[in-house]
Image: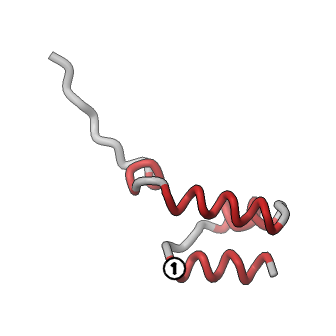
Amino acid sequence: MKTIIIEQWENEHYPLGTIKKQKLAEKTEHEIIFILNRMAQMPAIARFGEVSEVPTN
């Protein structure tokens, strides 16, 4: 069931890395759903760490 939850989420959002999948598999189903729901609400910048530097004057 855990694998199905993760695969369904990946199909609806974006693929997860191997390490992230392993860490999620160690959690309970309730925890997995909570974490994935939180991840779905994050902006892309926070997910991928693509933050550009802001020049200081």
Observer able to see residue 19:
no
Instruction: Using the image, determine if residue 39 lies above or below residue 17.
Output: above
The x and y percentages for residue 50 are 36, 49
Left or right: residue 13 compared with residue 7: left
Of residue 41 and residue 57, the one placed in the foreground of this image is 41
Farthest-out residue, top:
57
Number of marks present in the image shown: 1
The x and y percentages for residue 41 are 49, 58
Left or right: residue 11 compared with residue 20: left
Which SS class for mark 1? helix
Observer able to see residue 45:
yes
Residue occupied by mark 1: 12
Corner quadrant of residue 7 = bottom right
The x and y percentages for residue 24 are 74, 63
The residue depicted at 84 percent of the width and 63 percent of the height is 28
Corner quadrant of residue 27 = bottom right
The x and y percentages for residue 39 are 56, 58
Instruction: Using the image, determine if residue 43 lies above or below residue 33.
Output: above
- Which colour style is shown? secondary structure
Left or right: residue 12 compared with residue 44: right
The residue depicted at 40 percent of the width and 56 percent of the height is 44
Could you tell me which quadrant the C terminus lies in?
top left
Instruction: Using the image, determine if residue 55 lies above or below residue 21.
Output: above
Crowding near the residue tagged with mark 1, few <14, some 14–19, many ≥20 C-alpha atoms within 10 Å: few
The residue depicted at 70 percent of the width and 66 percent of the height is 33
The residue depicted at 52 percent of the width and 63 percent of the height is 40
Of residue 39 and residue 20, the one placed in the foreground of this image is 39
Residue type, label 1: Glu
Could you tell me which quadrant the N terminus lies in?
bottom right
Corner quadrant of residue 26 = bottom right
